[in-house]
Amino acid sequence: MQGSLTLGKEVVDTLAHYFKNPKSNIDGRRAMSLNDHTSDTISLIVNSAFLCRDLSLCNGTLTKFLNEYIITLTRTVENVFEGLLQISAKDKLENKIPKGVLFEAELKIILRSVKKFLSYADKKMVDDDESYVWMDLIKKINAKFQERADTFASQRLQGNAQEIGEVKAKLTQKLVIETSIVELEFCHKLCAKEKICIENFEVTKAFKTLLEELQGLPDSMTKSFIRYFHESLPDTSFYYRISDVTSNEFQAILNDMAYAENIHTKNVLLAIQNTVNDRLNSIKSKTYNSTGRDVKLVHVILSDMDHFYNQQGVDPFHKFRGKFYEWANSKTDSRFSSSIRQVMRDIANTLSLQSNELVLKLVNEVRAFLEITVDPQK
């Protein structure tokens, strides 16, 4: 990429280097630590907001938990931006760059939103279970960080529209991955330390059952199932939210899984099944496993979907499962494609009932997952 961007050529070079070289030093929270002054400033801003004042929601150590979550998210976002700007702690200490928090103004906006989230959640505790309310909070706070980080970048990028789009896409991917990792870590802490654990994970269980059933079908029927999904995908609104390159690559993979004789479709599905099993084991054992970023994105995507279906009761996909068993036992392809289209419409309807920020969060996570797994350009 060439041209003039306000953040300078370093941004483009650094982004290109990082996403092509996994050993790059610019690796979020692990590779670059904030200097003590910046870390102290972030902690002071968050703790001074008194987010949980007069709220019964934050009993015991939950105030500390909430503050730590927000501080960690802020440091994560700050590290990403500092990495892209190539600002070192030494530079700040030598006053080459003013001391302070790059993301400070946005953080204060986020904290005002968090106060509103908390006030609403405190009232919802009367009707909803504690785990649902806290999961909703964790996800909305992460979504707000992603939103404001996007705003922060947009306000500072000027130049060729295409170049800005490319830089922002890579930046969004990096931010989504890093903040999703933080979300997963704190969901685990919420359960392990605060004893507030998710109780309903119907989407994950239904997905596991479906993948197991597909393993038991003849290869031809497994490929037929992928073909139906492949054909129905362009009818979904999500399909048009990902880049042309990514969508084309994804469609090419699905096409190979559905039609190519040399592709072992069940092996691909088994890899996905292992990831789903890993999430279920993590939930049941209340442990947090350090896995690759693609696996973590699958976990957070399933976590979002489980949350969206939390209040729909047990086995929300029972109608689809019934149609699936009829099709599997009939050994024919008659009309099952319409059942797949229907369940995808049902999922779309469920998503339409969620808040815009949570749906956008899910879309960004799925997009990031596809980009790092099927799109060689990303």
Image (tube, grey):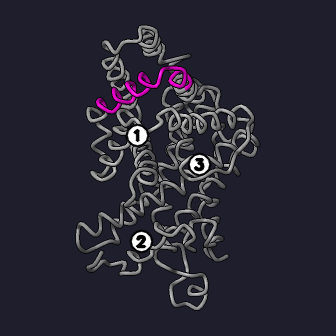
Whole-percent x, y for residue 117 in the image: 51, 42
Q: Residue at x 27, y 43 (%)?
A: 240
Q: Check disc 2 and report its element: helix, strand or loop.
A: helix
Q: In terms of image quadrants, where is residue 276? A: top right
- Work out whether 266 lies above or below 357: above
Between the residue at mark 1 and the residue at mark 2, the CA separation in whole angstroms equals 28 Å
Outermost residue, front direction?
A: 262
Q: Count residues near mark 1 (Cα–Cα under 10 Å), then give few for <14, some for 14-19, many for 20+.
A: some
Q: Check disc 1 and report its element: helix, strand or loop.
A: helix
Residue at which label 1 appears: 359
Q: In terms of image quadrants, where is residue 216? A: top right
Residue at which label 3 appears: 183
122 sits left or right of 106 in the view = right
Q: Nearer the viewer, mark 2 or mark 3?
A: 2
Q: In terms of image quadrants, where is residue 13? A: bottom left
Whole-percent x, y for residue 280 in the image: 65, 32
- As for residue 192 lying within the magenta part, the answer is no
Q: Is residue 141 visible?
A: yes
Q: Main secondary structure of the magenta part?
A: helix
Residue at which label 2 appears: 16
Q: Residue at x 40, y 60 (%)?
A: 378
Q: Between disc 1 and disc 2, whose residue precedes?
A: 2
- Work out whether 19 lies above or below 141: below
Q: Residue at x 69, y 42 (%)?
A: 190
> Residues at badges 1 and 2 in contact (C-beta under 8 Å)?
no
Q: Check disc 3 and report its element: helix, strand or loop.
A: helix
87 sits left or right of 320 in the view = right
Q: Count residues near mark 3 (Cα–Cα under 10 Å), then give few for <14, some for 14-19, many for 20+.
A: many
- As for residue 224 lying within the magenta part, the answer is yes
Please state the extent of the stretch shown in magenta in the rendering.
212-232
